[in-house]
Amino acid sequence: MLHLESLKDLRATRSTWVNNGASIAFVPTMGNLHQGHLRLVEHARSLADKVIVSIYVNPMQFGANEDLDNYPRTLAADMAKLKAAGADAVFTPTTEMVYPRGLSEQTFVEVPHISNELCGASRPGHFRGVATIVCKLFNMVQPDHAVFGKKDYQQLLVIRLMTEDLSLPIQIHGVATERASDGLALSSRNGYLNEAQRLQAAQIYTVMRSTEQALQQQNIATVSDIKKIEQESQQKLKAAGFTPDYVSIRRQQDLALATIGDNELVILIAAYLGKTRLIDNLEVNL
Ligand code: PAF
């Protein structure tokens, strides 16, 4: 597995591969890799001849009150995992390379509307940071395919829209969320939970399942019925010790508010456990 530390090396490697007829799949990450990331690499391997993974903790997607400095950086362990998973190259740009004129001077990419709702409402500027870095990485790597986890459902939609709006010739793939045996979605943030919180955290999955059951079994005649299910789920999260940010039932395709007649839905949850903000989602096909 190659470790590419400069854009020059990345471009040279990519050119050699592409000139030899290879297709390229790309998995952007912020490191601190777990089984969920390795699933993305596995999926990427099924799509193309060569797999490039990037590891870059992107300052532009962190808010002022979010702990960028303490984000876990575990490069040696990540490299070992990626090698075992069969990645062909790991690209690790520095902030000097990515934002040479500083964040405030950086041209940015913003996907309207969807970037300001749900997680975007609680994390202003977050999706601008995500769209900008992903667009930059796409231009650096120039892959045929790019793979993202469905765990970050809203992020996946932002990236799909950005790719479409900017006519980027890249196919975007979403991969199902990897879960622990108790249902908790794997996430780097789980590392912030203490032992008791880690046990409690699985209740998000339990609440999502009961929300799904309500959608499948109740007679939903009006939008108020959907709102009622959301409110009941918020109450369940509170009773389980969370501070909910939102429980929202949306359309899978565009994350518009679910309405009567929509069959392909997704339950989206964001909730705090102590200081840790957890997100999860469940697709429901009625
Ligand atoms: O999902 C992530 O890890 C990040 O948001 C991403 C897509 C790598 C952009 O920094």
Image (tube, grey):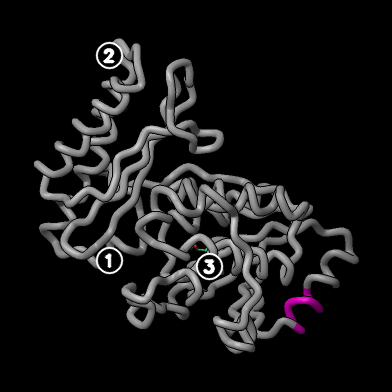
Q: Which residues are magenta?
A: 8-13
Q: Residues within 10 Å of mark 2 (few under 14, many from 20)?
A: few
Q: Position of residue 56 (x, y in %)?
A: 53, 75
Label annotation for residue 98? none
Residue at label 2? 218
Residue at label 1? 191
Can you tell me whether the CB of the residue at mark 3 lies under 8 Å from the nearest atom of ligand 1?
yes
Residue at label 3? 129
Look at the picture and state if 280 lies above or below 197: above
Task: Name the residue type under label 1.
Answer: Gly
Compared across the picture, whether 119 is left or right of 12 comes to left
Residue at 44 percent of width and 28 percent of height: 265
Q: Position of residue 126 (x, y in %)?
A: 46, 64
Residue at 71 percent of width and 50 percent of height: 165
Q: Quadrant of the N terminus?
A: bottom right
Task: Name the residue type under label 3.
Answer: Gly
